[in-house]
């Protein structure tokens, strides 16, 4: 057989062997199947079967491309080891492990017969993280929320997460249209700057609130109950016009409560949907409600298992009656009231369960208040938490209950009021009641949150009373955390100056005795107004000190004693008011001449005070009363007894309307002699004065006895002078009085949350009061300028050195023909070269000395503005007496710098 034939044979032989081998390998499978279909004959050639790959072994592993990371560190993330068998699935898993590290932006594995090479390109290192475009949300609000930071490895997943966090922050601010575009700036040494370009977009407002299904109440009524408000001009200052998902859920509860208060016990909100407009700038909220039927109260009953609670007595005290419209809020308040009442008897955990029996046919809701059995409770422990500065004893001494005492809800409430009145802690402090070690034990836990009590300020401002003013003060109301008060202040304005240092220890030697004192110097320029021009009359300088002590008599009543020593110096401008070295009554007025001089006042006094208000800083209910007397005469040169009394009561009218009714009055009784036979025994500077700001609608010292001087006399006809009584020719000096009273009715008006956030607190008021009761002073009238020789009103010529006055002679005209002498009505000017000064005629009138009330109504608003506290009042005087000075507008503002 030749070679060619031999090769072909071999080929046929090999092909036959392969086919036989395939048939033999397939035969067992067919045999095992047993029910396999008969073989199908095919004319197509059958390809040869590949042999299964044999697993290779890792001979070497090499890492290339790494710069910062060690090769061994990279291998620690993988499950590849030298000598380990591997296949393609093992290499695929290694690639997944490299991806999960997020350390590389590119990676691959090459295989050369078991020699593996891992090629990596590392992610860059972050050099800086930059925020751009954020104006409404400052960096200090964003940076704590993002995770990327300098010297970290850059990864895309972290960038995406930070973008989502920033967008979420803006959504919380109501900016649903905000977008964040992350940028990467490549630097050398494989570093990058990450830049978040922020487009804040507008605030997403609530454009419209739709309510579907309401028939008994209008959309406007229901929207008024919601915290969320529609964006409109009327809600321009409100922050509740932005969309807030939490507020949406709250509004559903508000709607339900509103309907339950009006008897709709079956009311429910079927759905509440907030849709964002296509431009992502506005939301449209739609509520679908089902009102149901309106119910009335059915039978009302009380069951009690407490021996101190008599059902018959409690039933008579219940506020709801059968036949009244059902009110779920009234039921809730009744349960709370019964719980508080049980607390008065020592039952801290009284189980009060209202059982409802609804009758859909009669549409009535019968209620039985079931007072379950519970043990009397005793205070096991009092815990105070959160006080980092204030000492424990400062908090505990305000507690009206001690450990081991029988529980009393009144004592707990009184403790809360006393702690809130301190002003050391955040508002709305509450004492939590927790179960003790046994059912008859209770733990009172007080969680306080301290607020700053120190004040250091430099301020400047302007007021309608003081004009421009400057103030520097330092005050610590909780000095050393012991509740002590330390203060120092300096005040300066155009018309008053003062320096004062003071210190008060509220618990002397840890006993309920307060001791305090102050030293001061006060310079006051008394003044009056001529039109809008302010005129200084006299200056009073007071230097002195005061010591006071207080001791409680009962829970609500205290007595205070005090002693003060003052040195007063009252002066007038000698260039204006003195002639001949003495005070000139024709210029200054006799009442001012009597007031000048130095005197010492040694004064001892006391005050009895009653105060059960819920908060001394911002009371909403309760009353206070004070009665005080001061006796001047324990040494010194002034002697009198001064008595004053004040009373105030606050009423909560509901819906956060607070009514305050207050009254005050006083009388000063002289014990010494008058400065002169013609003056009052009570000196001018010791009397009571009334006006702005105590009595709005009237100017400062604008009410009460006063001397009004009218000048600008028309002497065209000297026999009948014409007195100008207009305001332009009027000088007004208030004299004060021995007795006074004043009162006020004022209602604080609640505003929406937007205005509340701005610190606006408006009120309407009615003020009334009067001051009276001084000896009528000796006055100067036009009669004093009438020459008795000819009965003509004339100028007076006054000698500047002696103060003596003479009438100015009248100029005359002599007819040369007849020799008749005719007065011209003109008077010779006093010759200044001879030491004479002219004094024009004027007239003084005594007005305003009446006990009859002055009444004013008005409205005002307090505003905690960015420039400092601001108060503005508009008032109109309904009733006044002749001589009173009225004022419709007043304000006071200051600013800190």
Image (cartoon, helix red, strand yellow):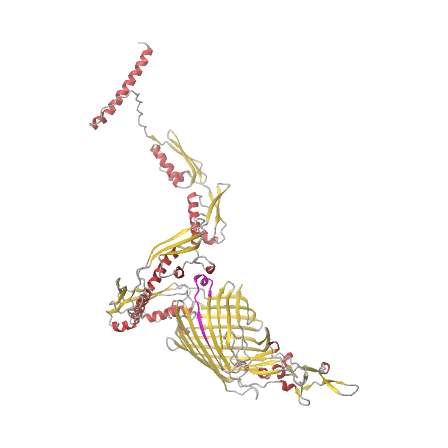
Q: Quadrant of the C terminus?
A: bottom right
| Residue found at the very far front of the displayed protein | 215
- Quarter where residue 267 is shown: bottom left
Residue drawn at point x = 31 percent, y = 12 percent: 6
Quarter of the figure with the N terminus: top left
Viewer can see residue 80: no
Q: Is residue 672 left or right of residue 404?
A: right
- Does residue 49 lie above or below 478 as drawn? above
User: 640 or 760, which is in the foreground?
Assistant: 760
The correct choice, above or below, for 110 with respect to 200 in the image is: above
Q: Residue 278 in the image: state x and y as whole percent.
A: 44, 48
Residue 570 drawn in magenta: no
The residues colored magenta run 743-760
Locate residue 255 relative to residue 540 in the image: left or right.
left
Percent position of residue 752, x then y: 43, 63
Query: Can I make out residue 610 in this image?
Result: yes
Residue 624, by quadrant, is bottom left
- Find the residue positioned furthest to the top: 1
Query: In the image as oriented, which residue stretches furthest toward the left?
Result: 34
Question: In the image shown, does 771 or 144 lie closer to the viewer?
Answer: 771
Where is residue 736 shown, x and y percent of the image? 53, 81
x and y percent of residue 854 in the render?
50, 78
Residue 276, placed above or below residue 849: above
Depicted 32 relative to depicted 123: above or below: above
Q: Nearer the viewer, residue 793 or 37?
A: 793
């Amino acid at each position: 057989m030749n070679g060619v034939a031999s090769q072909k044979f071999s080929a046929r032989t090999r092909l036959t062997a392969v086919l036989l081998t395939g048939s033999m390998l397939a035969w067992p499978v067919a045999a095992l199947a047993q029910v396999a279909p008969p073989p199908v004959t095919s004319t197509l050639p059958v390809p040869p079967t590949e042999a299964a790959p044999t697993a290779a072994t890792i001979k070497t592993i090499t890492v290339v491309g790494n710069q910062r990371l060690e090769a061994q560190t990279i291998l620690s993330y993988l499950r590849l080891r030298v000598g380990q068998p591997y296949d393609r699935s093992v290499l695929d898993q290694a690639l997944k492990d490299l991806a999960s590290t997020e350390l590389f932006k590119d990676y691959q594995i090459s295989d050369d017969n078991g020699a593996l090479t891992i090629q990596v390109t590392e992610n860059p290192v972050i050099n800086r993280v930059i925020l751009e475009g954020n104006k409404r949300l400052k960096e200090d609000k964003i940076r704590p929320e993002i995770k990327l930071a300098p010297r970290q490895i850059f990864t895309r997943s972290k960038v995406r997460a930070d973008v989502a966090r920033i967008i979420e922050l803006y959504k919380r601010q109501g900016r649903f249209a905000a977008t964040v575009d992350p940028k990467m700036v490549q630097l050398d040494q494989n570093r990058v700057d990450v830049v978040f370009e922020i487009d804040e977009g507008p605030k997403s407002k609530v454009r419209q609130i739709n309510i579907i299904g309401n028939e008994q109440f209008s959309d406007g009524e229901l929207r008024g109950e919601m915290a969320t408000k529609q964006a409109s001009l009327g809600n321009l200052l409100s922050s509740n016009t932005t969309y807030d998902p939490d507020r949406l859920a709250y509004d559903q509860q508000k709607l339900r409560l509103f309907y339950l208060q009006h008897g709709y016990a079956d009311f429910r909100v079927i759905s509440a949907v907030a849709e964002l407009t296509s431009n992502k700038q506005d939301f449209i909220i739609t509520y679908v409600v089902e009102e149901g039927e309106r119910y009335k109260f059915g039978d009302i009953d009380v069951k009690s298992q407490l021996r101190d609670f008599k059902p018959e007595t409690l039933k008579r005290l219940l506020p709801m009656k059968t036949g009244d419209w059902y009110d779920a809020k009234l039921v809730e308040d009744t349960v709370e009231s019964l719980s508080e009442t049980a607390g008065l008897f020592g039952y801290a955990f009284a189980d009060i369960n209202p059982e409802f029996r609804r009758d859909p046919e009669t549409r009535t809701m019968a209620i039985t208040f079931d007072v379950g059995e519970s043990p009397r409770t005793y205070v096991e422990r009092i815990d105070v938490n959160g006080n980092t500065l204030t000492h424990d004893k400062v908090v505990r001494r305000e507690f009206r209950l001690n450990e081991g005492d029988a529980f009393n809800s009144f004592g707990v409430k009184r403790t809360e009021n006393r702690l809130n009145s301190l002003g050391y802690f955040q508002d709305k402090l509450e004492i939590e009641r927790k179960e003790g070690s046994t059912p008859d034990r209770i733990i009172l836990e007080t969680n306080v949150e301290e607020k700053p009590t120190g004040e250091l300020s430099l301020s400047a401002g302007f007021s309608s009373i003081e004009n421009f003013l400057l103030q520097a003060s330092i005050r610590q109301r909780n000095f050393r955390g012991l509740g002590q008060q330390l203060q120092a202040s300096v005040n300066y304005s155009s018309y008053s100056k003062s320096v004062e240092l003071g210190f008060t220890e509220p618990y002397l030697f840890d006993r309920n005795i307060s001791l305090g004192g102050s030293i001061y110097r006060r310079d006051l320029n008394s003044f009056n107004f001529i039109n809008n021009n302010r005129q200084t009359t006299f200056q009073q300088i007071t230097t002195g000190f005061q010591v006071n002590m207080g001791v409680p008599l009962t829970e609500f009543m205290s007595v205070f004693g005090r002693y003060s020593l003052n040195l007063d110096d009252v002066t007038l401008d000698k260039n204006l008011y003195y002639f001949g070295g003495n005070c000139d009554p024709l210029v200054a007025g006799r009442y001012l001449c009597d007031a000048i001089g130095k005197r010492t006042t040694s004064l001892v006094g006391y005050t009895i005070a009653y105060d059960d208000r819920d908060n001394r800083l911002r009371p909403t209910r309760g009353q206070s009363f004070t009665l005080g007397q001061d006796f001047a005469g324990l040494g010194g040169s002034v002697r009198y007894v001064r008595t004053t009394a004040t009373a105030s009561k606050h009423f909560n009218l509901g819906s956060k309307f607070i009514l305050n009714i207050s009254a005050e009055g006083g009388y000063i009784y002289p014990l010494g002699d008058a400065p002169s036979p013609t003056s009052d025994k009570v000196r001018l500077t010791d009397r009571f004065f009334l006006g702005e700001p105590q009595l709005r609608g009237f100017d400062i010292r604008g009410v009460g006895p006063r001397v009004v001087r009218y000048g600008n006399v028309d002497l065209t006809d000297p026999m009948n002078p014409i007195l100008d009584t207009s305001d332009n020719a009027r000088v007004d000096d208030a004299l004060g009085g021995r007795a006074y009273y004043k009162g006020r009715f004022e209602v604080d008006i609640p505003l929406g949350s937007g205005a509340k956030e701005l610190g606006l607190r408006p009120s309407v008021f009615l003020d009334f009061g009067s001051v009276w009761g001084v000896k009528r002073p000796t006055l100067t009238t036009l009669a004093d300028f009438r020459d008795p020789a000819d009965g003509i009103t004339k100028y007076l010529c006054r000698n500047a050195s002696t103060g003596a006055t003479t009438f100015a002679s009248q100029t005359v005209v002599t007819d040369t023909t007849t020799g008749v002498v005719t007065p011209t009505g003109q008077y010779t000017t006093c010759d200044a070269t001879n030491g004479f000064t002219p004094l024009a005629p004027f007239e003084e009138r005594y007005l305003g000395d009446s006990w009859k009330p002055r009444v004013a109504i008005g409205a005002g608003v307090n505003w905690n503005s960015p420039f400092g506290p601001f108060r503005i009042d508009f008032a109109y005087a309904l009733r006044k007496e002749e001589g009173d000075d009225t004022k419709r507008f007043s304000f006071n503002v200051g600013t800190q710098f």
